[in-house]
């Protein structure tokens, strides 16, 4: 004779309903986990089973291409981008630093062109 073991529910129907309602209303999974005494992983799993969970998309910053960085440097220096095309072989970090420095210098040059000379 095999004894039947009763399955223990982690989430009652009422708790599930409240969890879904609060999540859909905008409450975070971290706040829900704290409120219901569950782990974040458990709450996410339950919301997935209920087909309401929307995963957080990782913020992906569009990286400026090397060609675009070289084009910005060329424009700031007033030269053709073809003249500086070989710069694209440099590292992205080096080109970002160069573009930033050239941009800063060109802004300073504009400032001094606008300042009237003292007489």
Image: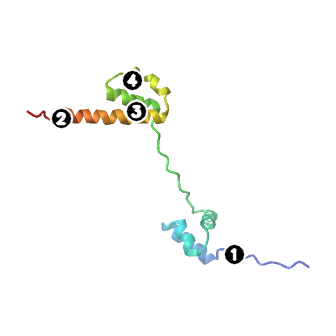
Alpha carbon separation for disc pair 2 and 3? 25 Å
Q: Which residue is mark 1?
A: 9
Residue 42's place in the image compared with 115, above or below, is below
Give neighbour class at mark 1: few <14, some 14-19, many 20+ (Cα, 10 Å): few
- For marks 4 and 1 on the same chain, the one whose residue lies earlier in the sequence: 1
Q: Which mark is residue 98?
A: 3
Callout 1 touching callout 2 (CB < 8 Å): no
Residue that lies at the very extreme toward the front in this rendered image: 119
Residue at position x 36%, y 21% in the image: 80
Mark 2, mark 4: which one is toward the viewer?
A: 2
- Residue 13 position by quadrant: bottom right
Residue 38 position within the rendered picture, expressed as x and y whole percent measured from the top left? 61, 72
Element under disc 2: helix
Residue 40 position within the rendered picture, expressed as x and y whole percent measured from the top left? 59, 66
State the quadrant of the C terminus. top left
Q: Which mark is residue 81?
A: 4
Mark 4, mark 3: which one is toward the viewer?
A: 3
Give neighbour class at mark 4: few <14, some 14-19, many 20+ (Cα, 10 Å): some
- For marks 1 and 2 on the same chain, the one whose residue lies earlier in the sequence: 1
Alpha carbon separation for disc pair 4 and 1? 66 Å
Q: Which residue is mark 2?
A: 114
């Amino acid at each position: 004779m095999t004894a039947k073991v009763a399955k223990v529910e982690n989430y009652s129907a009422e708790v599930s309903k409240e969890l879904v309602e609060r999540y859909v209303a905008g409450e975070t999974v971290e706040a829900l986990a704290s409120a219901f005494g569950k782990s974040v992983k458990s709450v996410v799993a339950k919301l997935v089973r209920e087909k309401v969970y929307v995963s957080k998309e990782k913020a992906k910053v569009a990286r400026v291409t090397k060609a675009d960085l070289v084009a910005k440097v060329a424009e700031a220096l007033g030269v053709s981008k073809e003249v500086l095309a070989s710069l694209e072989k440099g590292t992205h970090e080096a080109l970002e630093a160069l573009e930033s420095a050239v941009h800063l210098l060109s802004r300073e040059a504009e400032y001094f062109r606008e300042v009237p000379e003292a007489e």
